[in-house]
Image (cartoon, rainbow, N blue to C red):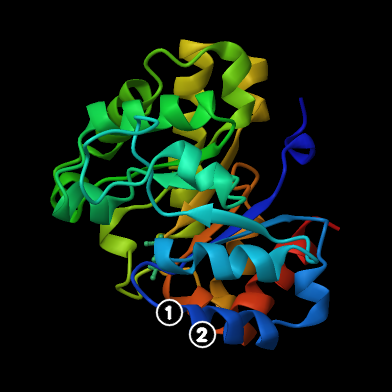
Amino acid sequence: MPADIRRTVVIANWKMYKTCRQAAEFLDALPQETRSERRVDLVLCPPFTALETLGHALRPTSVALGAQNVHWAEEGAYTGEISPLMLRDLGVTYVLVGHSERRQYFCESDETVNKRSLAALAHELIPVICVGESLDQREAGHTDDIVYRQVALALAGVTVAQIPKLVFAYEPIWAIGTGKTCAADEANRVIGLIRHRITSLYTPAAAQAVSILYGGSVKPDTMSEQMAQPQIDGALVGGASLEPKAFATIVAKAVGSRQ
Ligand code: PGA
């Protein structure tokens, strides 16, 4: 199956930035052509508090709403958590799972990444499963093993039919928020390994159907080289997604690379 059957996806991860008012201002400042772009899938992931405001504002656009985390239970005594049903209720269609900041600061484990992914799929939310190695792990030569392991553990219990309904993001931790982008050919190599892992766990067709993104200091001027790589299907963008002009340029480069 050729790579061009996969959807190209560009996701803004706003992390803990933007109030409701700032989220609305971002959308007002986003060029109309970006708001109505259909050639690539665009997703904005604001903090939970801005989901409802942004969800309303996104209705007349072709941009999807994403959340930054999800609990696996539908409801219960889990103070501070948000369930998949609550996200669906607000029109959320994508959810980030296992971002390295969750793994690093909030005790996210491969097991909870798996539980969140299964719950998202069961509720027809698209999990964007984030994997990637730390600098120490890379320097010790463990990148491939770490990524292989994270992919396999995240997918425990996921059926072959569900594989095309999820997205992976390769985000080397040392590249996140540091301005040090992973070289495009190296990101392409690791993303190829992720696809290889999915092939060995499922089928080549399933692996070819999954969009796998690169994330880590993506900027307007790193996009074209990244998108020229055959394994890379889009970007998960943190810092540069906070600014409408920069984000619109990143989207335009993703679109340009697919024409
Ligand atoms: P960055 O963040 O683009 O600011 O490096 C990416 C991410 O954390 O998803």
Q: Is mark 1 within 8 Å of ligand 1?
A: no
Amino acid type, label 2: Arg
- Judge the density around disc 1: few (<14), some (14-19), many (≥20) Cα neighbours within 10 Å: some
Q: Residue at x 58, y 20 (%)?
A: 162
Amino acid of disc 1: Lys
Of 234 and 100, nearer the camera is: 100
Say if 23 sits above or below 66 in the image: below
Viewer-side residue, 72 vs 254: 72
Q: Which residue is mark 1?
A: 18
Which of 210/78 is in front? Answer: 78
Residue 172 falls left or right of residue 2? left
Residue 97 lies, in percent from the top left, at 39, 42
In the picture shown, does residue 128 fall above or below 214? above
Q: Residues within 10 Å of mark 2 (few under 14, many from 20)?
A: few
Ligand 1 resides in the quarter of the picture at bottom left
Say which mark, if any, is on residue 21: 2
Q: Nearer the viewer, mark 1 or mark 2?
A: 2
Q: Residue furthest right?
A: 259
